[in-house]
Amino acid sequence: MDKVYLTAEGLAKLKKEHEHLTSVKRKEVTARIAKAREYGDISENSEYDTAREEQSFVEGRILELEDILRNAQVIDTSKRSDAVQIGSKVKVEVEGEEDEFVLVSSVEADPMQGKISNESPVGKALIGSKVGDVVTVASTIRSTYKILEIN
């Protein structure tokens, strides 16, 4: 896996999720599996099947998080840049309206929280742009973004 660029906040959030999964959730699921086994024949035991599916999901997510954390590189957001980069808070004008978001890696992306991925069409188009630049993003619709401010 390549480097995964994260904000300090994003790294802390992923570490917290990993800790919860390994110290709490894993034990809960193991207990559910043990309890379901007590019901007898596991071949037709839906509680057992459900618990095993959840265990599979939890263990998969733990492995995914460990891989991300092993390859994480924290973005230094204290260094100001005159160009948009991962970690930049960007104010843009789109179709006459102002919008503001933070450019993050796909691991941290959450558009509802104003965090867009550097791998998204908008993110890719904005990387390297400077205040005053106008970039066109063509995905399902074509939009023009004018960079107003970079923090």
Image (tube, grey):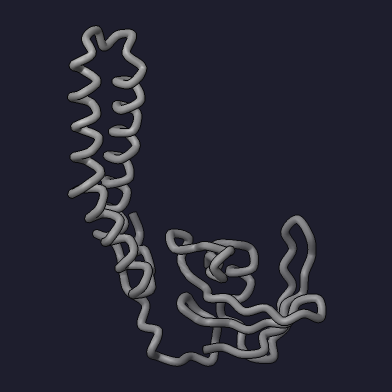
104 relative to 141, above or below: below
49 relative to 139, above or below: above
Q: Nearer the viewer, residue 59 or 120?
A: 59
Circle count: 0
- Residue at (34%, 37%) from the top-left corner? 57
Q: Is residue 14 left or right of residue 104?
A: left
Figure quadrant of residue 108: bottom left
Q: Nearer the viewer, residue 111 or 140?
A: 111
Figure quadrant of residue 42: top left
Q: Nearer the viewer, residue 111 or 144?
A: 111
Point out residue 11 in the picture as x, y percentages from the top left corner: 32, 67
Point out residue 66 in the picture as x, y percentages from the top left corner: 25, 53
Q: Nearer the viewer, residue 11 or 39?
A: 39
Residue at the outermost right position: 96
Q: Quadrant of the N terminus?
A: bottom left
Point out residue 41 in the picture as x, y percentages from the top left corner: 24, 7
32 relative to 72, above or below: above
- Residue at (75%, 55%) from the top-left corner? 140
- Residue at (81%, 76%) from the top-left corner? 95
Q: Is residue 49 left or right of residue 110?
A: left
Figure quadrant of residue 52: top left
14 relative to 115, above or below: above
- Residue at (62%, 79%) from the top-left corner? 100
